[in-house]
């Protein structure tokens, strides 16, 4: 009986984690935009100051100016 309780607790924790992560993605507004080259990324892609948008691993991501130089 104790083993069944542990399994139920693990399942509940796992589902709670999924819901929590989903809420974080919705609240922060993270958008995953797929691309093949950097020109596929939209010009209005929101990046922090001193960063620019690049296509990395088939996703548009913001890169620092310092990352590009090294």
Image (tube, rainbow, N blue to C red):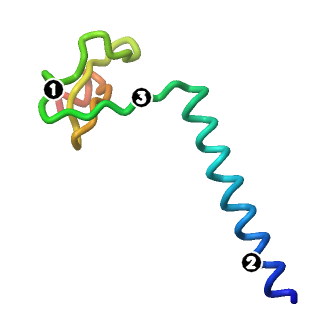
Residue at image mark 1: 38
Drawn side of residue 27 relative to residue 39, left or right: right
Q: Nearer the viewer, mark 1 or mark 3?
A: 3
Dividing the image into 4 quarters, which one contains the N terminus?
Answer: bottom right
Q: Quadrant of residue 23?
A: top right
Q: Circle 2 sits in a helix, a strand or a loop, which is it? A: helix
Viewer-proximal residue among 41 and 47: 41
Q: Circle 3 sits in a helix, a strand or a loop, which is it? A: loop
Residue 17 vs 58, above or below: the answer is below
Q: Is the residue under label 3 in contact with that under label 2 (CB below 8 Å)? A: no
Viewer-proximal residue among 21 and 62: 21
The CA distance from mark 1 to mark 3 is 16 Å
Kindly identify the residue that appears in the image at 26 percent across and 25 percent down: 66
The CA distance from mark 2 to mark 3 is 34 Å
Residue at image mark 3: 31
N-term-proximal mark, 2 vs 3: 2
N-term-proximal mark, 1 vs 2: 2
Drawn side of residue 8 relative to residue 2, left or right: left
Residue at image mark 2: 7
């Amino acid at each position: 009986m104790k083993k069944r309780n542990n399994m139920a607790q693990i399942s509940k924790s796992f589902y709670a984690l999924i819901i929590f992560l989903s809420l974080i993605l919705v609240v922060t507004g993270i958008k995953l935009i797929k691309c093949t080259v950097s020109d596929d990324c939209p010009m209005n892609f929101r990046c922090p100051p001193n960063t620019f948008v690049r296509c990395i691993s088939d996703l548009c991501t913001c890169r620092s100016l310092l990352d590009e130089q090294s």
